[in-house]
Amino acid sequence: MTWTTNPETFESKMLPHLNAAFTLARWITGNVQDAEEAVQEAYLRALRFFQDCRGGDGRAWLLQIVRNTCYTQLRKKPRLSDSEFDEEVHAPECCSGTPEKIAIRNADSEMVHKAIAELPARYREILILRELEGMSYSEMSTVLDESLGNIRTMLFRARQQLKKRLIAATAQQNSKIDSGMPIIIP
């Protein structure tokens, strides 16, 4: 079944994936403004070619367009510097617990985000698609245009790299505690 270019159909099929599209774009581009621009351009492209999308929920199809749009923009626009991860974009809306627990949770979250941001782009993408967006291997295969075997391998390697970075960051944090250096928790 081929969808028509009816705006109501497009909205009902594609708008539910807006958060996933923005999350992926944010991690690829490295900043909010470029991510917003990429998502807007991707949605325009998706609307233009919507009649070519065949059935399903369209999430993998849309995220593939978002990914390609991001990389096209990155090739056109040289990056001047890596921006830091914007915690406000990905922070939970409601935090509960004692101030100490909230501070520890925020510090842990920042450490994970920093470790993910330091990964090579391919590993970052696959972790975001699997762990944050909950995509299946088949959907990731479509988005990344890779075989299922490559998806499994890349995901395994990405998780291993993330684990190494987190172990190193935790060891560094523990050495600061052991040396008596003050730890500043944002």
Image: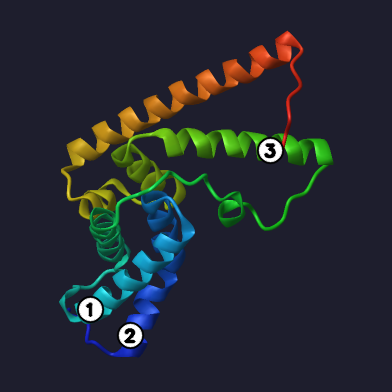
Residue closest to the eye, 75 or 140: 75
The residue under the point 38% across, 57% down is 25
Q: Which residue is mark 1?
A: 50
- Using the image, determine if residue 12 lies above or below residue 156: below
Mark drawn on residue 105: 3
Q: Can you tell which mark lies on residue 9?
A: 2
Q: Is residue 180 above or below residue 110?
A: above
Query: Label 3 to label 2, Cα distance in Å?
Result: 40 Å
Neighbor class of circle 3 (other Cα within 10 Å; few <14, some 14-19, many 20+) is some
SS at mark 1?
helix
Q: What is the distance, in whole Å, between disc 1 and disc 3 at their CAs? A: 41 Å
> Is disc 2 in contact with disc 1, using a CB cutoff of under 8 Å?
yes
Q: In the image, what residue type sits under mark 2?
A: Thr
State the image coordinates of residue 150 (x, y, percent, origin top left).
19, 37
Q: Position of residue 57 (x, y in %)?
A: 32, 69
The residue positioned farthest toward the top in the image shown:
179
